Amino acid sequence: MQETQNPMEQAQSAVEHRPVFMPRVNSDNLVKTDMVRFERHVGFASRQKKKSINDMHQVIRKKYGFSHVLELSSKSGNKLSFPLSPLSLKLTNEYDGQAYSVENAFQSSMIFEDGGSYTDLLTVPPRQAKKDARLTTSGELIGYNYFGMEWSVEPLTTFYDWLYVNALKQNTHLHEEVMQYQAFTDREFNPKKSIHCAAYALAMFVALNKRGLLDNVEDPTVFFNLYHEFKVSNTEHLLEEGWV
């Protein structure tokens, strides 16, 4: 069915800020996170969202001199975005040999003051897992438990990044194409509302791969140490810098 467009959408636009995540090789950061300012085309039609993404990427190309930027949201228009989505990308765990999406693994591992982890979320559709009411009615998030492997909340995003990096490491058929990109975005990710971002974790994978540091990242201790060996520039950095 062809999308209809509100006539007002043609002329309307607004300023928007979104992060761009850039893998780094010769730096004390694995990933450099920066905010870009671009014109947001008002409206919910897919064409409006694609225009906004194109404008954002034009700003990134001009500002940083990049030629290859990948948008990870469903409105990307790039076929690579789908298998790299946390809703699609799967991690096979060593405990039961089953493969679960990054989204399912993450949501099902959360431990709250008043409940969790809700392991039944491993096997529901990923979008359903993400929207499960218990995740917002069980009190403060205090940690994670992934098949008996316990993670703390701090440093922020560590557990989520570990899941995503290891899932992508297992999916070797995606590596060659992924490594061609210089920066990653997800326009649907709003740092005012969320902390964890697959585009950041994807940039981290590229940086680790280029540096030859992917060996043993399955070991939580090895991965955790990366957050002390390198300066962290994720959404927590945006908070510190006053962007959000």
Image (tube, grey):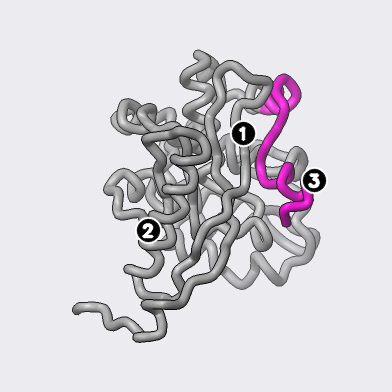
Quadrant (top left, top right, bottom left, bottom right) of the N terminus? bottom left
> What secondary structure is marked by label 1?
strand
Give the camera-side residue of 78 and 53: 53
Give the x, y percent position of residue 40. 49, 65
Q: Is residue 45 visible?
A: yes
Give the x, y percent position of residue 213. 54, 16
The residue that appears at 28% across and 83% down in the rendered structure is: 4
Give the residues in magenta: 224-244
The residue that appears at 44% across and 40% down in the rendered structure is: 61
> What secondary structure is marked by label 3?
helix
Between discs 2 and 1, the one toward the N terminus: 1
Q: Amino acid at mark 3?
A: Glu
Between discs 2 and 3, the one toward the N terminus: 2
Give the camera-side residue of 153 and 207: 207
Task: Give me the C-alpha separation between circle 1 and circle 3.
Answer: 14 Å
25 vs 116: above or below: above
Label 1 sits on residue: 32
Give the foreground label among 2 and 3. 3
Label 2 sits on residue: 74
Label 3 sits on residue: 240
Task: Give me the C-alpha separation between circle 2 and circle 3.
Answer: 29 Å
